[in-house]
Amino acid sequence: MRFLLGVLVGYSMRGERKLLITVLATVAFIVYIILPTAALLALRWDVQNERNARPTRTKVPPIKGLSYEEAEIKLHASNLHIRVLATRYDLPLQPGLIIDQVPQPGEEVDYGFPVGVTITKADSHVHPPVTARLSRPQPWRQPFRSCRALLIVVDDSGVKSNKQLGWATVIFAS
């Protein structure tokens, strides 16, 4: 750039070769002014199109402590959906309350994004019945399926322990 500027100033001071000065000045103007301006404008237009193509985003409202129905109404007002991720039976809280949510309140997500919740259920000492019994694989028994089973035991303190059952015949109640 300095070299071109020096050539242009030198030739213009001498007053010789006016055509060369005009051509060099025009080339310098196009290369150093017009082309970068056009490139930056094209980049700006592309970035704007990219931003406009993104889905609309919204902030996740706080729903901890609300009932499932209240949280569903609040999330639908924010154009979000609700999804139950887990149910806790071991907490001494009112049944049906939301105790955790993912994503956390205040995070920005796309419209229609499902917010995962953990809710409480009634009676912390009653566990759903397990309908499985141990046996060897018996392929002639059509209504039953044999599979490997893993028993997860949760004691009153909330500690989990895994026990391998071996082959089990699982009875699916209808």
Image (cartoon, rainbow, N blue to C red):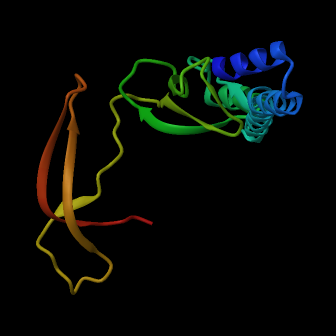
From this view, report whether residue 37 is shown above or below residue 105.
below
Q: Residue furthest top?
A: 13
Quadrant of the rendered image containing residue 155? top left
Asked if residue 39 lies left or right of residue 126, the reply is right
Q: Residue at the spot x=11%, y=72% of the render?
A: 136
- Asked whether 173 or 43 is in front, the reply is 43
Asked if residue 45 lies left or right of residue 6, the reply is right
- Asked whether 81 or 31 is in front, the reply is 31
Number of labelled discs? 0
Q: Position of residue 164 (x, y in %)?
A: 12, 52
Q: Residue at the spot x=45%, y=66% of the render?
A: 174
- Asked whether 90 or 44 is in front, the reply is 44
- Asked whether 174 or 5 is in front, the reply is 5
Check the picture and name the quadrant holding the N terminus.
top right
From this view, report whether residue 167 is shown above or below residue 55.
below
Asked if residue 58 lies left or right of residue 122, the reply is right
Q: Residue at the spot x=79%, y=26% of the render?
A: 33
Q: Position of residue 38 (x, y in %)?
A: 80, 34
Quadrant of the rendered image containing residue 173? bottom left
From this view, report whether residue 140 is shown above or below residue 64.
below
Q: Position of residue 41 (x, y in %)?
A: 80, 32
Q: Position of residue 92 (x, y in %)?
A: 41, 18
From this view, report whether residue 84 is shown above or below residue 103.
below
